[in-house]
Image (cartoon, grey):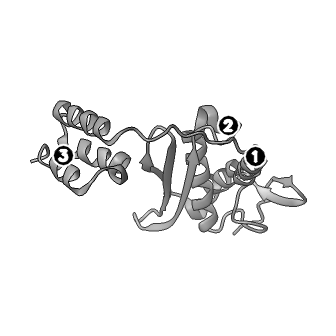
Amino acid sequence: MSNYKFKTTNIRGKQYVEVNERIKFFRQEEQYKGWSISTAVVHMDTDEVVMCTSIIDSNGSLIATGHAHEVKGSSNINKTSHIENCETSAVGRALAMLGIGIDTSIASANEVETAIAKQEVPQQEVVTAPAAPVENIMDKAVEYLKSAKDKKRAYNATIKKYGDQLTENQKAGLQKFVR
């Protein structure tokens, strides 16, 4: 590795390299010429995202990976940009696994700042509504399955959401809509 001097950010007395510094180093170093950074969504729904970044060498071999998980609204940045933040974290971790910018830590300054922000946000009390009557759930589930184009996916979503409130006979009844 060259004598590149990474810019760092001091967070609570410890120096952390920012992801942009790791990317700059990766892009300018001759030893990584022809290598690529590839990101992919592993899981995404309305509230969270999991991403994986792969570092591929010039021969097409997988050299390093990094994963990240972010929850929408879990920090100020994640209120509007949880997907982008997740991708940045995954890239930073993959480059760290490659050995870039890890003199003091694998975690990047971006990751540490996000983690601290999440810890400092006061936990809100979660108020849950009482469970709906089982008959009402069955009526809704039947309507949903009848109208769904992908009945298997609709069934799986129903079981995931309400499975613990349904009897085995009710689940078997709903399964009939999938066939």
Residue at the (39%, 38%) spot, across then down = 132
Residue furthest right as drawn:
13
**Kind of element beneath mark 3:** helix
**Kind of element beneath mark 1:** helix
Residue at the (76%, 49%) spot, across then down = 113
**Few, some or many C-alpha atoms within 10 Å of disc 3 (few <14, some 14-19, many ≥20)?**
some
Q: Which residue is mark 1?
A: 117
Q: Earlier in the sequence, mark 1 or mark 2?
A: 2
Residue 37 shows up from this direction: no
27 over 31 or under it: above or below: above
| Quarter of the image with the N terminus in it | bottom right
Q: Nearer the viewer, mark 1 or mark 2?
A: 1
Task: Give the amino acid at mark 2.
Answer: Ile
Q: Nearer the viewer, mark 3 or mark 2?
A: 3
State if disc 3 and disc 1 touch (CB < 8 Å). no
Distance between the Cα atoms at labels 1 and 3?
43 Å
Residue at the (67%, 64%) spot, across then down = 100
Q: Earlier in the sequence, mark 1 or mark 3?
A: 1
- Residue 35: give x, y in percent of width and height: 50, 58
Task: Give the amino acid at mark 1.
Answer: Ala
- Residue 119: give x, y in percent of width and height: 75, 51
Residue at the (48%, 39%) spot, across then down = 130
On residue 174, the disc is 3
Distance between the Cα atoms at labels 3 and 2?
41 Å
State if disc 2 and disc 1 touch (CB < 8 Å). yes
Task: Give the amino acid at mark 3.
Answer: Leu
Instruction: Out of 177 and 132, give the one closest to the viewer.
Output: 132
Could you tell whether 133 is left or right of 149 in the image?
right
Distance between the Cα atoms at labels 1 and 2?
10 Å
Q: Earlier in the sequence, mark 3 or mark 2?
A: 2
Q: Which residue is mark 2?
A: 77
